[in-house]
C-alpha cells in the first residue's frame, strides 16, 4: 500500500515538474485579476485564488495556488502576475511558483513514503522467514521424536 502511494506521489511530482518546465519555456505571462480567495491556511492567509485574465482565445477563469510571500495583492479586484499555457490556458501558475518548490515537497514526501514501504517490506520478510524457520524446526523435531 505504501509503495503504491509513493509511486502515485512520485508520478504527481514528475507531472508537476513537466508542467512547470513547459510553462517556463512556452508559457505566457500576464496580469490576472483576483476574483475571490478560494482557500486559506489555518492562519488565515490565502493559499489559493480564483483569478480571471484574457488570452487571445478568450477570457479564462482558474484557480491559482499562492505562497504566503506572493499574496500581498490577494484581495478581490487586485492583480497578480501569472503564467499560463497557451495550448491549455487553464493551466496557470503564479510566477513565484515556477521554481518547483511545491513539486520538491511532493517528491520528498514520496521518498519518505517509499522508505516506509521498504521498511515494512523488510520487516514482513524477516517475520515470514522467522516463522518459516520455526515451523520447519518444529516439524523436524516432531518427526524425529
Image (tube, rainbow, N blue to C red):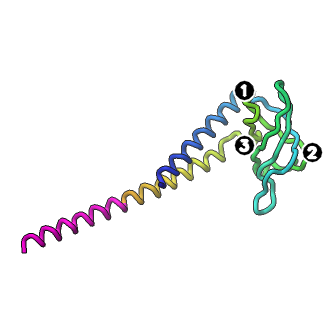
The residue identified by callout 2 is 77
> Does the magenta-highlighted stretch encompass residue 101?
no
What residue do we see at 31% from left, 62% from top?
Answer: 126
Q: Can you tell which of label 1 and label 2 is closer to the viewer?
A: 1
Coordinates of residue 72 in the picture (x, y in percent): 86, 50
Q: Can you tell which of label 3 and label 2 is closer to the viewer?
A: 2
User: Which residue reaches farthest bottom?
Assistant: 145
Figure check: 47 above or below 64: below
- Do labels 1 and 2 touch, CB within 8 Å? no
Q: Earlier in the sequence, mark 3 or mark 2?
A: 2
Q: CA distance from mark 1 to mark 2?
A: 26 Å
The residue identified by callout 3 is 97
The residue identified by callout 1 is 87
**Callout 2 secondary element:** loop
Q: Can you tell which of label 1 and label 3 is closer to the viewer?
A: 1
Q: Earlier in the sequence, mark 1 or mark 2?
A: 2
**Callout 1 secondary element:** loop
Residues rendered magenta in the picture: 123-145
| Quarter of the image where one finds residue 15 | top right
- Residue closest to the eye, 145 or 84: 145
Amino acid at each position: 500500500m505504501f509503495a503504491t502511494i509513493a509511486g502515485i506521489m512520485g508520478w504527481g511530482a514528475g507531472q508537476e515538474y513537466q508542467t512547470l518546465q513547459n510553462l517556463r519555456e512556452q508559457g505566457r505571462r500576464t496580469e490576472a485579476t483576483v476574483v475571490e480567495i478560494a482557500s486559506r491556511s489555518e492562519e488565515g492567509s490565502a493559499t489559493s485564488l480564483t483569478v480571471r485574465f484574457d488570452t487571445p482565445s478568450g477570457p479564462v477563469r482558474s484557480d491559482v495556488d499562492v505562497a504566503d510571500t506572493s499574496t500581498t495583492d490577494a484581495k478581490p479586484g487586485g492583480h497578480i502576475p501569472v503564467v499560463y499555457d497557451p495550448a491549455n490556458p487553464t493551466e496557470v501558475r503564479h510566477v513565484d511558483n515556477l521554481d518547483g518548490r511545491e513539486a520538491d515537497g511532493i517528491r520528498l514526501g514520496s521518498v519518505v513514503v517509499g522508505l516506509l514501504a521498504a521498511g515494512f517490506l523488510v520487516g514482513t520478510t524477516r517475520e515470514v522467514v522467522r516463522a518459516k524457520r520455526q515451523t520447519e524446526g518444529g516439524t523436524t523435531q516432531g518427526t524425529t521424536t
